[in-house]
């Protein structure tokens, strides 16, 4: 199976801004477009001498080359609070904002603080600390989701530790003072030894380390230089409270989102560890990791579109689409890292970004019973939207071959029929009946197809 994609960027005009040395990027006006899925089949049939009646709509041949074309708009351009990935989008957005303020060394303020919010937020922090105190020491409340459940609604991981759960709460803070108050509440609980939360061993964020060390001190009967160690930990907490409240939460957020994406891609069997690791490299700077998180979210959005629009599509084909997109994005990571260098003037148009529209064409195997069953199920639910029959290689006596083209539309959350109601709509996916990638129109060869 082959997978091809193109990246389009909404700039309000139709000027091409592709760089010859980079993957082609088309700049088109997509202001009125929405996500869609189209199933397009092309095949040929022999025509005997003397001609024959053309079958309309045509009955697909086992040799038909079926192409599933998806246009995926960024989730933020089709906002819907019910979409399962909206929460993940909000977390990345907040982490990105914090990273910028943290690296610039500036005070962070989201919105105008009010007494009502301050009181409400303080109450939520107190309730969170109290619930953590009353939880049994070492109780993780963990569950192990079945493989099929990992991607079902993109559920929150069930193994979130105390630091990660605290982060999900404080991301609703409005300024540094809210963050300082949260750290102070943790410090007080640790000092009184009432707070003994669960911290995952893999959580190596500074806040997790301080909590872990405080718990070890509380449990140790004897400890060399106990007072010095206690003062060191208290000093670190005081520094965060008084001077650097963003510091611990930026690091916890990076850890949490790395774990979340690993959970979805590897735990959900969407990709291999080798494919995901370059996007979660702990040696990268915070802004480089955040840029990677946006790309991983974009891949999950394409997966979600496939699941919503064509739930009957064999899972292996959707996974191969995810694999191709990951490989495509991985090739751009060097560009992203260069762009994070303040002294570098890299043109952002040369590498993929979250706001890009992704058009992906999935070439399904021919002579596949599984594909034929899938196509038949789609055809039962949707009438053909467009079909054509054209003579090719015919002689003057009517013998030769007919090329059929059949388009089936699948409804998606963002599809409007008017996108395909006129001849102006650009729906052609394949330039000819051949599945050879070299024979495709140039605009569909944005990155080399992965032959699977």
Image: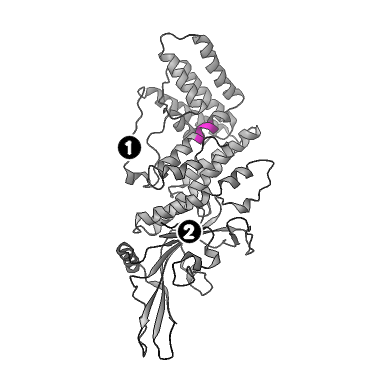
Within-10-Å neighbours for mark 2: few <14, some 14–19, many 20+: many
Left or right of 314 on screen, residue 88: right
In the rendering, at what x and y percent does residue 142 appear?
34, 32
Residue 88: mark: none
Q: Quadrant of the N terminus?
A: bottom left
Magenta highlight range: 249-254
Residue nearest the viewer, comparing 310 with 111: 310
Is 225 one of the magenta-colored residues? no
Q: Nearer the viewer, mark 2 or mark 1?
A: 2
N-term-proximal mark, 2 vs 1: 1
In the rendering, at what x and y percent does residue 141 appear?
34, 31
Residue nearest the viewer, comparing 262 with 160: 262
Residue depicted at x 42% and y 18%? 194
Residue 144: mark: 1
In the rendering, at what x and y percent does residue 325 appear?
48, 53
Whether residue 108 is visible: no
Element on which disc 2 rests = loop
Q: Quadrant of residue 340?
A: top right
Element on which disc 1 rests = loop
Report the colour scheme.
one colour
Residue nearest the viewer, comparing 156 with 23: 23
Residue 449: mark: 2
In the rendering, at what x and y percent does residue 446 appear?
54, 59
Q: Is residue 159 above or below residue 299?
A: above
Q: Quadrant of residue 7?
A: bottom right
Residue depicted at x 39% and y 38%? 157
Q: Main secondary structure of the magenta part?
A: helix
Q: Is residue 197 above or below residue 418?
A: above
């Amino acid at each position: 199976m082959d997978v091809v994609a193109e990246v389009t960027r909404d700039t309000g005009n139709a000027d091409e801004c592709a760089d010859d040395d980079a993957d082609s990027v088309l700049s088109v006006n997509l202001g009125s477009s929405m996500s869609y899925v189209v199933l397009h089949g092309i095949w040929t049939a022999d025509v005997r001498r003397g001609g024959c009646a053309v079958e309309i709509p045509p009955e697909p041949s086992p040799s038909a080359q079926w192409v599933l074309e998806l246009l995926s708009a960024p989730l933020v351009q089709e906002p819907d609070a019910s979409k399962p990935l909206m929460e993940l989008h909000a977390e990345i957005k907040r982490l990105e904002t914090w990273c910028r303020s943290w690296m610039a060394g500036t005070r962070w303020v989201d919105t105008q603080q009010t007494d009502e919010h301050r009181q409400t937020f303080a109450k939520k922090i107190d309730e969170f600390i109290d619930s953590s105190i009353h939880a049994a020491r070492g109780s993780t409340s963990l569950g192990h989701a079945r493989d099929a459940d990992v991607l079902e609604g993109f559920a929150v991981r069930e193994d979130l530790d105390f630091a990660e759960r605290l982060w999900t709460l404080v991301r609703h803070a409005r300024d540094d003072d809210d963050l300082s108050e949260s750290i102070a509440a943790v410090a007080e609980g640790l000092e009184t030894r009432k707070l003994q939360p669960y911290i995952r061993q893999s959580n190596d964020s500074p806040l997790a380390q301080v909590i872990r060390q405080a718990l070890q001190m509380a449990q140790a009967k004897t400890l060399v230089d106990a007072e010095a160690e206690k003062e060191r930990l208290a000093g670190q907490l005081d520094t965060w409270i008084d001077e650097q409240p963003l510091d611990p939460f930026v690091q916890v957020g990076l850890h949490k989102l790395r774990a979340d994406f690993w959970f979805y891609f590897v735990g959900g069997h969407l990709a291999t560890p080798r494919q995901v690791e370059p996007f979660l490299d702990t040696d990268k700077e915070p802004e480089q990791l955040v840029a990677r998180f946006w790309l991983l979210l974009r891949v999950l959005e394409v997966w979600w579109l496939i699941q919503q629009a064509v739930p009957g599509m064999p899972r292996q084909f959707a996974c191969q689409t995810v694999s191709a997109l990951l490989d495509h994005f991985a090739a751009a990571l060097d560009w992203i890292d260069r762009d994070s260098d303040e002294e570098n003037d890299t043109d952002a148009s040369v590498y993929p970004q979250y706001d890009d529209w992704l058009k992906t064409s999935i070439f399904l195997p021919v002579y596949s019973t599984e594909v034929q069953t899938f196509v038949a199920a789609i055809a039962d639910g949707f009438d053909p939207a467009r079909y054509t029959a054209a003579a090719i290689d015919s002689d003057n006596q009517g013998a030769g071959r007919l090329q059929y083209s059949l388009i089936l539309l699948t409804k998606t959350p963002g599809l409007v029929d008017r996108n395909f109601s006129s001849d102006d709509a650009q729906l052609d996916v394949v330039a000819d009946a051949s599945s050879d990638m070299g024979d495709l129109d140039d605009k569909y060869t944005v990155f080399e197809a992965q032959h699977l």
